[in-house]
Amino acid sequence: GENVEQHPSTLSVQEGDSAVIKCTYSDSASNYFPWYKQELGKRPQLIIDIRSNVGEKKDQRIAVTLNKTAKHFSLHITETQPEDSAVYFCAARYRAGYALNFGKGTSLLVTP
Amino acid sequence: GAGVSQSPRYKVAKRGQDVALRCDPISGHVSLFWYQQALGQGPEFLTYFQNEAQLDKSGLPSDRFFAERPEGSVSTLKIQRTQQEDSAVYLCASSLGTKISNQPQHFGDGTRLSIL
């Protein structure tokens, strides 16, 4: 099965700075990598995803990069705002499987 | 509906009782997933349905857990003889296609289950 490691577990940045969260996965056959944002007591919300045939994807202030050789992918948030504060989860889906395998999450705090 | 709907939002049960959790996926979504999320952890896969067929139940922790989706839309997760370690948030997600299409999974708000 797939094993996903996520770092750091907590991250505090000043408003306007960038935040980077990194994940590694174990199975080279994984082909789909979404990122979810979860606010306290709320549902996980998909913020961006990337497939294994793409190296980078950007959506406004959010970008994700994928290094298939090293088996890691990263979330980059630029010009952070207090409303970006939440727990962020990375996930990977093994090509032959159905489930998403999630990291343990990163609690991001953006201070004004 | 506009999104995945789960009920109840909160459930408190005594140890040993049976519980049933409901998920109403986005209309037309073929795939339905159940995940368990312990406090401070990421969601962990329980089971997957493609229409009414349960294609993967490898994540169900024990035979006390049972899920069904008889008509390919609404799904129910049942836990029999609940134990304290069953306390968690149970999340349902649906996606438009099958695994091959790698469509995004959309989550519901979850059911927070507390076993006393």
Image (cartoon, coloured by chain):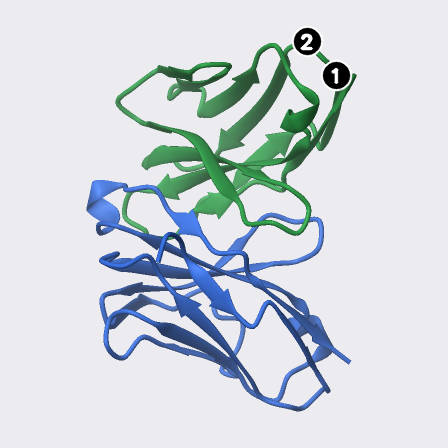
Chain colours: A green, B blue
Percent of width and height locating residue A65: 43, 17
Query: Residue flagged by tag 1: what amino acid is it?
Result: Val
Quadrant location of the C terminus of chain B in the rendered image: bottom right
The residue that mark 2 highlights is: A17
Circle 2 packing at 10 Å, graded few (<14), some (14-19), many (20+), is: few
Quadrant in the picture for residue B5: bottom left
Q: Chain of mark 1?
A: A
Disc 1 crowd rating (10 Å Cα; few below 14, some 14-19, many 20+) is some
**Rendered image: mark on residue A13:** 1
Q: Chain of mark 2?
A: A
The residue located at (32%, 57%) in the rendering is: B26
Please tell me the numbered disc located at residue B95. none
Image quadrant assignment for residue A48: top left
The residue most toward the front is B1
Percent across and percent down for residue B39 are 71, 55
Viewer-side residue, A83 vs A71? A83
